[in-house]
């Protein structure tokens, strides 16, 4: 039997018997359960906020390793960008110069990605700055590699066509001028023979009798055959491909037609005195992608270094032109 329990009553100054039936024990059990649950929640809260679980410890270790890998990746991407920059410099200053290809501007090589923020999904990460920076570097490397790959494709194509290119580049004098005495006036500022004002002369004048044969200076296709009593007078323009064109002005007669394919050294017409001209001569121009360049630099199949220096001297002596 259960023990009888008493409780002191200060009003009556006596001990009253305490009922200890089923309800009493049920209340005790309920109180114990509630207090135990409360204490359990308190300990759980304290433990979960003060102590880390094995899973959390494992995840933290993995995060440290991932952060370290990102830092290593960022460093290697910097090294890759340095190597890629060196390759781009060689491409610009060696390969594209040798094959006379257009330069690729940095604005294209290092162009970013427009539009929406493509890294927005990374902004909520704890190490978002490092991750986004690394992602941007990786995207930059991929973009530059794509541009560089296309550049090398172009260079390979030009290399395979180099023999054709050599045949097409203007490389001889347009008239017979072995002793260089027909060199009249060269490239640069000259006195206009008619208007008596200084004007930039974008070609080279060769003095020669009317009817002297004119030779095309590189393989190409006749682009223009034009007759006129002003300006260039009668002239022929030849497209050599690879950005090169040549112009032969003040001619007396033509021996070619538009669209005709011509070979270096082939006679395309004869010296004349047509258009804005003060005497029989040939005005000869070389243009690259529409821009006039000094024709004297393109006689490398005709002239020795000594003859080249002599031509420069002769053409520079005259301060006026024939046209």
Image (cartoon, grey):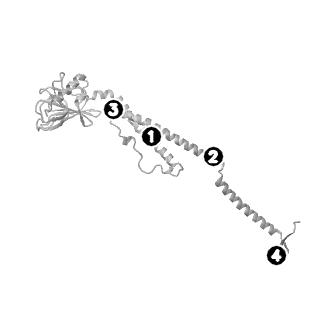
Mark 4 residue element:
loop
**In the rendered structure, which segment of residues is drawn in magenta?**
55-59
* Residue for badge 3: 97
Front-most of 111 and 272? 111
* Residue for badge 4: 10
Q: How far apart are marks 3 and 1 (CA)?
A: 24 Å
> Do residues under tags 2 and 1 come within 8 Å of each other at their CB atoms?
no
In the depicted structure, whether residue 282 falls above or below residue 37:
above
Front-most of 62 and 171? 62
Q: Distance between the residues labelled 4 and 2?
A: 62 Å
Q: How far apart are marks 2 and 1 (CA)?
A: 33 Å
* Residue for badge 2: 58
Q: Around disc 4, counting alpha carbons within 10 Å, would you say few (fewer than 14), some (14 to 19), or many (20 or more)?
A: few
Earlier sequence position, callout 3 versus callout 1: 3
Q: Around disc 2, counting alpha carbons within 10 Å, would you say few (fewer than 14), some (14 to 19), or many (20 or more)?
A: few
> Do residues under tags 3 and 2 come within 8 Å of each other at their CB atoms?
no
Q: Where is residue 74 in the image (x, y as percent from the top left)?
A: 49, 41
Please tell me which residue is depicted at 80% across the width and 66% down the height of the picture. Answer: 25
Mark 1 residue element:
helix
Which image quarter: residue 197? top left
Q: Which one is in front in this view, the residue at disc 4 or the one at disc 1?
A: 4
Q: Where is residue 116 in the image (x, y as percent from the top left)?
A: 43, 51
* Residue for badge 1: 141
């Amino acid at each position: 039997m259960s023990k009888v329990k008493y409780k002191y009553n200060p009003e009556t100054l006596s001990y009253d018997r305490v009922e200890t039936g089923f309800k009493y024990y049920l209340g005790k059990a309920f109180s114990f359960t509630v207090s135990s649950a409360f204490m359990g929640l308190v300990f759980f809260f304290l433990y979960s906020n003060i102590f880390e679980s094995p899973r959390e410890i494992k995840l933290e270790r993995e995060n440290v390793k991932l952060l370290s890998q990102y830092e290593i990746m960022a460093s290697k991407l910097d090294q890759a960008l340095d190597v890629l920059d060196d390759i781009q410099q060689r491409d610009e200053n060696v390969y594209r110069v040798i094959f006379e290809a257009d330069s690729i501007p940095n604005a294209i090589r290092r162009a970013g990605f427009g539009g929406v923020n493509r890294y927005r999904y990374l902004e909520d990460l704890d190490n978002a700055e490092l991750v986004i920076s690394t992602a941007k570097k990786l995207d930059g490397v991929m973009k530059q590699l794509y541009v560089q790959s296309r550049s090398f494709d172009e260079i390979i194509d030009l290399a395979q066509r180099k023999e054709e290119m050599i045949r097409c580049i203007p490389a001889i004098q347009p008239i017979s001028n072995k002793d260089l005495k027909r060199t009249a006036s060269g490239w640069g500022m000259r006195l206009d023979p008619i208007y008596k004002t200084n004007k930039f002369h974008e070609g080279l004048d060769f003095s020669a009798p009317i009817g002297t044969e004119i030779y095309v200076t590189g393989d190409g296709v006749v682009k223009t055959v034009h007759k006129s009593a002003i300006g260039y007078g009668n002239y022929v323009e030849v497209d050599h491909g690879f950005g090169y064109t040549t112009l032969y002005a003040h001619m007396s007669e033509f021996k070619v037609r538009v669209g005709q394919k011509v070979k270096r050294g082939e006679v395309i017409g004869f010296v004349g005195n047509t258009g804005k001209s003060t005497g029989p001569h040939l005005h000869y121009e070389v243009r690259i992608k529409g821009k006039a360049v000094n024709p004297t630099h393109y006689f490398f199949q005709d002239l020795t270094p000594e003859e080249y220096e002599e031509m420069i001297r002769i053409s520079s002596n005259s301060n006026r032109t024939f046209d």
